[in-house]
Image (tube, rainbow, N blue to C red):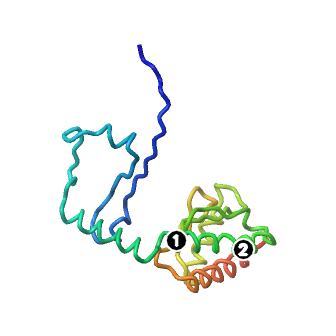
Amino acid sequence: MFRHTEVKADILILGKALSGGAYPVSAVLANNNIMNVIKPGNHGSTFGGNPVAAAVGMAALEVIKDEKLAENAQELGELFRAELQKFIDTSNIVNGVRGKGLLNAILINDSEDSETAWNICIALRDNGLLAKPTHGNIIRFAPPLVMTKEQLLDCVTIITKTLKQFEK
């Protein structure tokens, strides 16, 4: 007979930029409820245990910790959303801003089928800032973790200047 017991399990999967772009590195962080399930020999990976990847990943994590990049991302992300919200409060082109840390998005006031978000991204590019449209009417912003407050505010200026060109 199976007896269900509720177990709290936390897991975080990291990849892509974990090595700072120097080498392909990914990782799984989990609490003991998850990690104690996997025993030596139960799981394998093509690149698992790669000493170069491990050294690069460890060095990158040290930089993230020493330079307080997670804290910087949290602080700058809050600033980004607050500054854009000031524009959104008087805008008819943007419905909202959302995100966590430095990974943020704005929702364009148009249908998913429109090309408005794409056209805004082209205008942003022409004004000196790269962004990616996604889901038709959402524009994603994913700056580097080493971004400074001054750089972020410059970006907000470019974004708001560009969005004003699309006001209806």
Image quadrant where residue 162 sits: bottom right
**Residue 150: mark in rendering:** none
Please tell me whether mark 2 sits on a helix, a strand or a loop.
loop
Please tell me whether mark 1 sits on a helix, a strand or a loop.
helix
Image quadrant where residue 87 sits: bottom right
Q: Judge whether 69 appears above or below 40 on screen.
A: below
**Going 71% across and 60% down the picture, which residue do you hit?**
110
Nearest the eye: 85 or 94: 85
Q: Is residue 2 left or right of residue 120?
A: left
**Going 33% across and 55% down the picture, which residue do you hit?**
27
**Residue 71: mark in rendering:** 1
Which residue corresponds to mark 2?
A: 166
The type of residue carrying mark 1 is Glu
Q: Are the residues at dot 2 and dot 1 in contact (C-beta closer than 8 Å)?
A: no
Q: Is residue 120 left or right of residue 13?
A: right
| Disc on the earlier residue, 2 or 1 | 1
Circle 2 Cα neighbour tier, 10 Å, few/some/many (<14 / 14–19 / ≥20): some
Q: Judge whether 107 appears above or below 149 on screen.
A: above
Q: List x then y, in percent, for residue 30.
A: 39, 48
Q: Is residue 150 left or right of residue 91?
A: left
Circle 1 Cα neighbour tier, 10 Å, few/some/many (<14 / 14–19 / ≥20): some
**Going 33% across and 58% down the picture, which residue do you hit?**
26
The type of residue carrying mark 2 is Phe
**Going 34% across and 43% down the picture, which residue do you hit?**
35
Q: List x then y, in percent, for residue 7.
A: 47, 34
Q: List x then y, in percent, for residue 15.
A: 37, 59
Q: Is residue 77 left or right of residue 88?
A: left
Per the model, the C-alpha gap separating discs 2 and 1 is 34 Å
In the rendered view of the protein, which quadrant contains the C terminus?
bottom right
**Which of labels 2 and 1 is toward the front?**
1
In the rendered view of the protein, which quadrant contains the N terminus?
top left
